[in-house]
Image (cartoon, grey):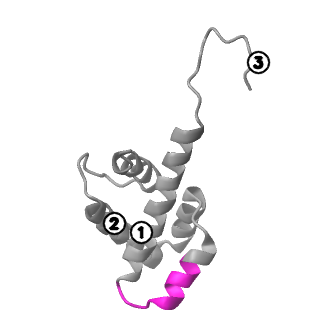
Amino acid sequence: MQLLPETAVQIAANTALSIPEHITYDQLESLLAARLETLINTDFQQFVLLLYKIDVAEKKVRQVLADDTTANVYRKIAALLIERQQQKVISRKTFTRPINDNDDEERW
């Protein structure tokens, strides 16, 4: 299952980043880390909103921030966001049923 392209699209939508179509994991992590660094330093409220939007566990982010005080911390947080977004992509693929227009069952 090729997760990175779909993950990149979702991250682009949530972060307003322009992400190239054929991006590697390391490139995505680096690009996202730079965006996170900017948010943390200039608009912390937007950073928190992004974490909420992507549904990253606050406990995990706090742990990363407590364990690492180097510039590498942004890449670690970026990895958390990418991981969570990939989990959501997998979940959508696993639990989405194809729509059958001939199905008379009531749809919610």
Can you say whether 83 is above or below 41 in the image?
A: above
Say which quadrant the C terminus sits in: top right
Q: Residue furthest top?
A: 102
Q: Please identify the dominant SS of the magenta region.
A: helix
Q: Would you name the residue on which mark 1 appears?
A: 78
Q: Nearer the viewer, residue 24 or 42?
A: 24
Q: Nearer the viewer, residue 4 or 95?
A: 95
The residues tagged by marks 2 and 3 sit, at their Cα atoms, a distance apart of: 42 Å
Answer whether labels 1 and 2 touch (C-beta < 8 Å): yes
Q: Would you name the residue on which mark 2 appears?
A: 29
Q: Would you name the residue on which mark 3 appears?
A: 106
Can you say whether 90 is above or below 31 in the image?
A: above
**Comparing marks 2 and 3, which lies closer to the viewer?**
3
Q: Secondary structure at mark 3?
A: loop
Q: Secondary structure at mark 2?
A: helix
The residues tagged by marks 1 and 2 sit, at their Cα atoms, a distance apart of: 6 Å
Where residue 5 is drawn, which disc sits there? none
User: Is residue 37 highlighted in magenta?
Assistant: no
Image x and y of residue 69, in percent: 43, 91
| Among the 4 quarters of the image, the one containing residue 58 | bottom right
Answer whether labels 2 and 3 touch (C-beta < 8 Å): no
Image x and y of residue 73, in percent: 41, 82
The residues tagged by marks 3 and 1 sit, at their Cα atoms, a distance apart of: 41 Å
**Comparing marks 3 and 1, which lies closer to the viewer?**
3
